[in-house]
Amino acid sequence: MAGFASVAAGQVQDFTFGAGGFAVVGSPTINERWADLRLQPDGRILVAGSTGTALLGSAGNALIARHLANGAIDTSF
């Protein structure tokens, strides 16, 4: 599980983003590694990563999620 925040140009956190200023992606019950975040031209946010680790002998799976510009999960993705 990972979280991210929206910060305005003056380095002030946007507390209207997500829930209380943070958007959360992932699950607390699986081993995840979130590695990249990209802002799309339309303001939507892509977050990518994987599950499992070589140390645990797991091949893992790719993870990708998209959030709306306000931090909510994009359920149309």
Image (tube, rainbow, N blue to C red):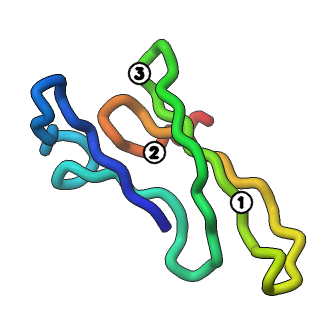
Q: Are marks 1 and 3 in contact (CB under 8 Å)?
A: no
Q: Given the image, on which type of amino acid does mark 3 rest?
A: Gly
Residue type highlighted by circle 1 = Ser
Check if mark 1's residue and mark 2's residue have beta carbons within 8 Å: no
Q: Residue furthest bottom?
A: 56
Left or right, residue 23 beside residue 33: left
Disc 1 or 2, which lies upstream in sequence? 1
Between residues 22 and 58, which one lies in front from this camera angle? 58
> In the image, is residue 51 above or below residue 71?
below
Which residue corresponds to mark 1? Answer: 50
> Between tags 1 and 2, which lies in front?
1
Q: Secondary structure at mark 3?
A: loop
> How far is disc 1 from disc 3 in space, using C-alphas?
23 Å
Q: Residue at x 36, y 29 (%)?
A: 69
Q: Quadrant of the C terminus?
A: top right
Classed neighbour count for the residue bearing mark 3: other residues with Cα under 10 Å, few (<14), some (14–19), many (≥20) = few
Q: Are marks 3 and 2 in contact (CB under 8 Å)?
A: no
Q: Residues within 10 Å of mark 2 (few under 14, many from 20)?
A: some
> Where does the image place residue 33, in percent across and percent down from the top left?
62, 64
Q: Which residue is mark 2?
A: 73
- The local crowd at label 1, few if under 14, some if 14 to 19, many if 20 or more residues have their Cα within 10 Å, is some
Judging by the rendered image, the residue that carries numbered circle 3 is 43
Q: Amino acid at mark 2?
A: Ile
- Image side of residue 19 versus residue 52, left or right: left
- Residue 2 sits in which quadrant? bottom left
Q: Earlier in the sequence, mark 1 or mark 3?
A: 3
Q: Position of residue 26 (x, y in %)?
A: 53, 63
